[in-house]
Image (cartoon, grey):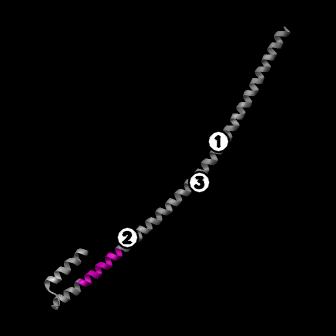
Amino acid sequence: MTKKGGYIEKLLKKADKALQEGVKKADEVLDNAVELGVMTAKQASKTSKELRNQAKREREALQKRGIEKITKGITAAKNVTSNTQEDLEILKKLGKLRTNGIITEKEFQTKKKKILDRI
């Protein structure tokens, strides 16, 4: 009976050793997973910060371009307005020249058409 008892004891020791090795390997795998999770979280944080910075730069560039376009539009509108005023003044002067006989009706109408086409 001691033989059987010794055999079972050896078998239990082997099983215990195998379980301990399995637990040790499971702990190593778990440690690696935790380490990977920490690294992944750090990388995600870094990537998120980079994306926020990129979005901020793009927003600033869009704002700058928008302001430039608005400024160009305002300038163009001012030019059109001032040109229109100048054209109306020229028409008045041409009318006086026609009235005073300095230019003919045909010359007046030709100039008037060119000016009105610009407006």
Q: Quadrant of the N terminus?
A: top right
Instruction: State the residue position of label 1.
Output: 37
Tell me if residue 51 comes above or below residue 2 in the rendering.
below
Amino acid type for the residue under numbered disc 2:
Gly
User: Can you say whether 16 is above or below 81 in the image?
Assistant: above
Q: Is residue 14 magenta?
A: no
Within the image, what quadrant is residue 28 found in? top right
Q: Going from the N terminus, do you reach mark 3 or mark 1 first?
A: 1
The magenta span reads 77-90
> Mark 2 or mark 1: which comes first in sequence?
1
- What residue type is disc 3 on? Lys
| Amino acid type assigned to the residue bearing label 1 in the image | Gly
As helix, strand or loop, the secondary structure at mark 2 comes to: helix
Q: Residues within 10 Å of mark 3 (few under 14, many from 20)?
A: few
Q: Residue furthest top?
A: 1
Q: At which x and y percent is residue 29? A: 69, 34
Q: Is residue 113 left or right of residue 79?
A: left
Residue 115: quarter of image: bottom left
Tell me the distance, in whole angstroms, between the alpha carbons under discs 3 and 2.
Answer: 36 Å
Classed neighbour count for the residue bearing mark 2: other residues with Cα under 10 Å, few (<14), some (14–19), many (≥20): few
- Tag 3 residue: 49
Q: Quadrant of residue 82?
A: bottom left
